Amino acid sequence: MALDGNFTHALVAELSFLIGGKINKVHQMDQSTTLLKMRAAGKNHQLLISSHPMYARFHISQEKYEFPFEPPMFARILRKHIEGGIITDLKQIGNDRLVEIHVRAINELGDDIKRILILEIMGRHANIILTDDEYKIIDSIKHLTPNNNARTVMPGFTYEQPPTDKKLNPRSQEIDDLVKFIDWNRGKVKRQILSHVEGFSPVFIDEIEHRAGLLTQHNLLPTIKEVMKDAEDIVPVFYDLKRPVFYHTPLTHLGEADKTFENLSELLDDFYHKRARQSMIKQKANDYYQVIEREHAKTLRKIDKLKEDLSEAKEKEKYQKYGELITAYMHTIKPYSQTVRVLDYYTDQEIDIPLVDHLSPADNAQRYYNKYNKLKKREKLARKQLDIARMDVEYFSNLLHQMETITTEDEVEEIRQELVDEGILKAKKSNKKKKKSKQVKLHEFKTSNGLPVFVGKNNKQNDYLTNRKAQNNHLWFHTKDIPGSHVVIAHNSSDISKEDILEAAMLAAYHSKAGQSASVPVDYTEIKHVKNIPGTKPGFVTYSEQTTVNVTPDEDKVKEMKV
């Protein structure tokens, strides 16, 4: 991404139509994001302003948002001071990610007041600050105390701009002095430009270097001015690279853009909304992930305890033999004996048997029989519980994998409901009528030959795909002995080519715990050979007549196959 000073300059110019607009309503979605609903240029608009450490930005948004029933304090302050006000100016400070929105409003007494909403769009240092016309702070969405900060941002203090090194403004004649500040013998010219020019990002300096070839004191300024002039041609672009990049103008060093947009707000809405939403989904999912992780660890401890029980149960045969030998030699045992030596007719050797001296020989024999029966029952129960616990571990391992691949709120809700159904989570108490369950949405792909392939990413989707959507002659895929998704080619198996099979198997490998591995074993068989296991947790099936292939997941191929 590259929301730098140059991008901010272009964005402020794009939003200049808001000058003269009226702020009708102020909302605050969370601790970092506000929304101004306003009327400008004959239309209604939503100006989103975020100070999120990862998603700081400002732009017109077309998305729908939910707001808390009780507005946070900062929202109340903004409502008091700027709601109903008119925007009189919108300007960037220097060439930095620092913007002022000037508002003229009327206070409770009917007097005209002037307020300034300052947007510091600076990553983890981002903030939204409201001041009066003399820059005295009224409030801010983030307070900075003087203890550990270079400046104080608190009500009553005079606003100071973020402490940064004095840099040259590339939009003024100051930039002509840049060559004087570059130490050409030191090298790392791009880093020196970054530290001396205001509002330039690494990606923009990469473009300057690409245009210049080799940066020298002769071509540096002409190239900067050339790129700055070309950047006045606003074409919002997005590059889907390993680290995604967007900018307000095409960057020749990145090649052809993957996507272009009508305007900068549309670009920011698309880029940030998806990521902010995904972050929120991950946060929700993380709460359930911790619950599943706890159950997984608890089940592993249970398995260890059951194995200890089985180890102890191995002694049961010894206790049964002690009981038999005491009964056989009962007439030779003296009262109050603490031990008795007898001939073990199983081994034809003498052994010593411990006794409880205050019990009769018959009671001692019965005591060992009781121990034998107790351990026998304990062993039987432990073996049964161990089988269940091992299936539970596999179940929780599957759930942990599913949680790691969640992409939508519906998937989070499906997992949550499953945890409730299994008694792992308590159901939410609600007086509202129970909502109708949403139709299960599967992830759809197509093979190179155009055959539809469906993937389930959680147990609910897997169950729906395997037991309801798929037909008997469809091919079903799953990684061999590895947690993963159910995958089905929804086509008659007799008409499926080897290429289709390998592509579907690759999808199964990609959507599994081994998604980053090579040569992943994947089983496939017809749906008619896949059966549910009665009495087990969701997602468990057994299958037969399978064939195994080894495939390597290919992310680019997965994206190409996605419908």
Image (cartoon, rainbow, N blue to C red):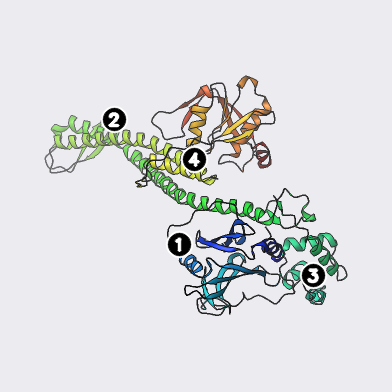
Viewer-nearest residue: 39 or 439 = 39
Residue at the extreme front of the image, as rendered? 110
Q: Secondary structure at mark 2?
A: loop
Sequence-wise, the earlier of marks 3 and 4 is 3
In which quadrant will I find the C terminus? top right
Residue 43 place in picture, x, y as percent? 61, 56
Q: Which residue is mark 1?
A: 71
Q: CA distance from mark 4 to mark 2?
A: 54 Å
Residue at the extreme top of the image, as rendered? 494
Q: Which mark is residue 398?
A: 4
Q: Which residue is mark 2?
A: 348
Q: Nearer the viewer, mark 1 or mark 2?
A: 1
Sequence-wise, the earlier of marks 3 and 2 is 3
In which quadrant will I find the N terminus? bottom right
Q: Nearer the viewer, mark 4 or mark 1?
A: 1
Residue 292 place in picture, x, y as percent? 44, 46
The residue that appears at 82% across and 67% down in the rendered structure is 225
Q: Nearer the viewer, mark 4 or mark 2?
A: 4
Q: Quadrant of residue 435?
A: top left
Q: CA distance from mark 4 to mark 1?
A: 40 Å
Sequence-wise, the earlier of marks 4 and 2 is 2
Sequence-wise, the earlier of marks 4 and 1 is 1
Residue 365 place in picture, x, y as percent? 18, 35
